[in-house]
Structure formats: C-alpha cells, structure tokens
Image: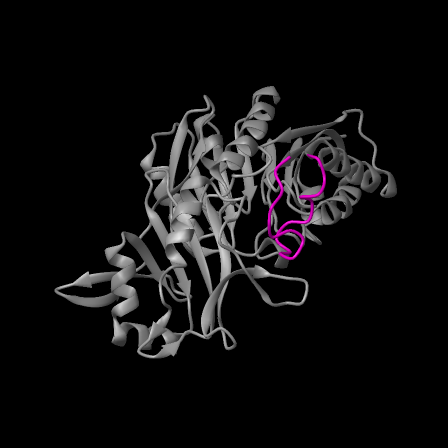
Amino acid sequence: MTICSYFPTCTGCSHWNLPYQQQKNKKIEHLKDLLRTHNLETKSQINFISCGEHSLRHRVDFTLEFDLESQKHKFGFYDQNKKICHIETCLQLTPELQKIYHEFIQFDFFYGNTPIKKASVRLRTSPQNLKGCWLDFSNIEIKHLLEDQKLLNQLLNAGFVVEMGQKSKRLKQINGALKLTSPEPNVWFKTINHEEKELGLKCLISDFTQPSWLSATVLVKVVSSWIKEIPRIKTVLEFGAGIGQFTLCFLSHDLNVEVCEINPSAIEQLKLNAQMHAFKGELTTRLGDFHKKTISPDKKYELIFVNPGRSGLKKFTDEIKKTESEYLIYVSCFPETLMTDLLELAENYNLCNITIVDQFPQTNHFETLTLLKKL
C-alpha cells in the first residue's frame, strides 16, 4: 500500500493510513448514515465509482511563504499548527503536474533582495502539455516583480504560461519588455460528449474546474447515462454550469440548454467552448445568483440540473418545487447540505439513483450524484 511520507503532518489528506477498500466502505457508510438521519428512502443501492487511489490531479493550489529561520521559501499545504508543510512530492498529482511543480519550486521568489512573504499559487497542466501558473499575488508585489523582471522572465523562459492577480492578466514579453495583457483562455481542461469522445474546454488557469479531467469525465459519464434513460427529454435548465463540463455533453445529446451562472467570466468561457464544437442543441445563458432568486425557473423544462457549491441550494429548493420539471439531477461536493436539500425536495421528488464518484481519494471528501423523479 502506498503511503505519503508527509502524512499525517500535511493536512491535505487524512486517509493514507487506511486501505482503499476501507476508505470506500467508510464513504458509503457515511452517506447511508446521512440518508437514515434525514429519513430519506431510496430503492436504489449506493453506487461507488473509483477514479483511482492517487495521481489524479491536473490542478494544484498551494501556498508559498518565506521562512525567517531558514531564509528560504516553503511551498506546500498547511499542517495541524497552521504552518506550511514544505512539499517536494505530492502523490495526488499526475506525473506531468508533479514535474512542473518540482520545477516551479526551484525558482527564487524575490524582487531584488526582498522575498515574497506569502502568496497563493495555482499550477495546471493542459491536455496539450502546456505548463500554467496563476500567481495570486498582491498588486504591490506584482508591481515590484514587473520592475525587477528577473523571476518573471525565468518563468516565461522556462515555458510557463503565467497569469497574475485577481484579474488573471496574461504576462507576455512584448518588444523586449514585460507586459500584463488581457486574460487569454487556453484549452486547460476537457470533457466528453454523449459518445464519450473528448472535447477540449477553454478557460483561464485561474478559473474553477474539477481538480482532474479524469474524474470530471467520470462524473459526466454518469450524468450522460441517466440522460439516455430519461424518455422524451428535449430541454434542460442548468444551474452552476461553470465553463461547460456538463453543458457540452447536454448539447451533444441534442438538448436545448438554458444555463444560469453567477460568474460572468464563466459564461464567456462557456459560450466560447460551445462555439468550438458543432452541436444541434441550442444554448442560452442567463447571468444571476439563483441563491438570491435573481434567477428563477419561469417555464417548463423536462430536466433541471444543479451543481451548487458546498452551501447547497438553500431556499432555491422552493423555486424548484414550483416548476413542472419531471426530473432533477443534483451533483454535490458536500453530502451534508445535499441531504438538507433532498429532504426539502422529498415532498415533490423520489430519489431514483445515488452514486458516489470518489475524485478525492485519501480524504473524507467525495462527489455525490443523485437522480430524482417527480412524484
């Protein structure tokens, strides 16, 4: 059994001491306990799909911090004492991402003789093997780095695509000078269509995606299989579409999809991704926050698809219950709020299928997909 050498000091993973079968049983039992606690019944057994025990991530978020004692930077994740555990090798990263992570932490994060004290970083690999980094540094640190040029030139010369700051501006060398230009999407991710053929997804390095396109395609496969089982479906209302991981698959099923999304940048990337691929299904988009009811369903759809954050649907369950939609698919990264929402929906919907996709092995976390049918 593989064991991480940083366990249990690093808090990124909690289950390296448990055989994977035991982890699987633990997650299934946790979901069963939640269903029992909330008096939710399902005739379907809980399905469990593994994405692998490690080496999954194509995206990693970590912290760099200057250590006064050693006078060197530490790169990694927090330990139990809220201090940075310096990580050289993370078993959760794909070999490609581990390679660029190791390359990245060799750079000196200084401007002149002044170190970057503390900052957040995201690294990505792309399906075309691009190396991407998002430096979420303060504006003053970005200004100093642009003036100093040394570190930023090193990153560009090493082949990194660099985005900087909260606005994710692209760093470029133009006429021998470093410039921050407008954000520039690349194919950093991918999904699948109804025939399980791969589709590239354009986004920014800083955009939210699943941690891995390996696990993302597993999630889409499950949802796509349910779509094929639903009779006479033509229209979908999707909440929380992001850059289109599920949307493109819906469109490839020749479904007309209306997307509701709070993030204007995500909507722009979604439109771009839909234009990259030829679909018979039509896409329309609405910008707003369904939690605050700035968006609510106003006509009939055969299917409502929701993929909220950890906070769940909250009061939006009331809006769903008002609709005539016969089917509801709910994708959740936090089973506790999922159960609260399912309890609210139980007076209108039966729970037909519940599936765990284990895209976070060696941790307590997992993704839950549920299919519901109107009573």
Residue 358 in view (yes/no):
yes
Q: Is residue 99 above or below residue 152?
A: above
| 293 is within the stretch colored magenta | no
Residue 347 in view (yes/no):
no
Magenta span covers which residues? 1-19
Q: Quadrant for residue 15, please give it.
A: top right
Q: Is residue 35 above or below residue 185?
A: above
Question: Which secondary structure class fits the magenta region best?
Answer: loop
Residue 241 percent across, percent down from the top left: 51, 44
Residue 102 percent across, percent down from the top left: 41, 52
Which sits in the foreground, 372 or 237?
372
Q: Residue at x 45, y 60 (%)?
A: 121
| 11 is within the stretch colored magenta | yes
Residue 375 percent across, percent down from the top left: 77, 30
Left/right placement of residue 89 relative to residue 336 reads left
Residue 353 percent across, percent down from the top left: 71, 28
Which sits in the foreground, 364 or 66?
66
How are the colours assigned in the image? one colour
